[in-house]
Image: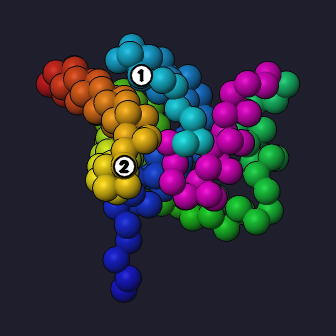
Amino acid sequence: MAAVNPRLKIESYCLGVLLRKPDLLYRLDRGLEEFGLTALTVEDFEYTDHQLLFGVLRLAMEQDEKEHEQYVLSQIPETLSTLTNDLLAQTEKVDTLDEKLLDDLLGRFLDLRRTHAMTNVNQLRFIQEDEQQAGGANLKVYMEQTGQYIRLISAIDQAKRKLSKRQV
């Protein structure tokens, strides 16, 4: 059996839970905002299919003509129906009424954001080294971007600490 990318597993779990209970998205956004972080966006997902599904979830929350679950199921592109069914099957045993579920999802999204930010910091460091050797004309821009990601990582770490205190 092939190894599964941990990020893929986390994204799949989070999306599966959100497909089961789209209303959690409001509470996740509020939780992130309480920590001084931005609401969830498609950029929080690395995989294109996941980004498309999340886009449908976000649209469901922004409309009020249909129940959120009905809207999501009616708007999912045919090409994603197999993935949707897999995600729902993977999260079949998840208790969506469990109060700890929200904190669990928040923690997972914080982990995803931190991993993404660390990847960007590492890439920017390589770019900075290359830029320095090439004369450094754009070095300041890359250093500013690195600083933004480092501040984001710090905010995420602070949010994780607050979240873990809440879970005790």
Question: Residue at (46%, 46%) from the top-left corner?
Answer: 14
Say whether residue 69 is visible.
yes
Judge the density around disc 2: few (<14), some (14-19), many (≥20) Cα neighbours within 10 Å: few
Q: Residue 89 at what x, y percent from top left?
A: 53, 61
Task: Return the disc, 2 or 1, that comes first in the chain's sequence.
Answer: 1
Q: Is residue 116 above or below residue 66?
A: below
Q: Secondary structure at mark 1?
A: loop
- Name the kind of residue labelled 2 in the image: Gly
Question: Residue at (38%, 71%) from the top-left corner?
Answer: 4
Question: Residue at (63%, 58%) from the top-left corner?
Answer: 49
Which residue does the numbered mark 1 point to in the structure image? 37
Which residue does the numbered mark 2 point to in the structure image? 135
Question: Is 110 inside the magenta-drawn segment?
Answer: no
Judge the density around disc 1: few (<14), some (14-19), many (≥20) Cα neighbours within 10 Å: some
Tag 2–tag 1 contact (CB < 8 Å) = no
Q: Residue 110 at what x, y percent from top left?
A: 34, 36
Q: Is residue 44 left or right of residue 125?
A: right
Q: Secondary structure at mark 2?
A: loop
Looking at the rendering, in which quadrant would you find the N terminus?
Answer: bottom left
Magenta part of the chain: 44-64
Q: Nearer the viewer, residue 12 or 39?
A: 39
Q: Nearer the viewer, residue 29 or 140?
A: 140
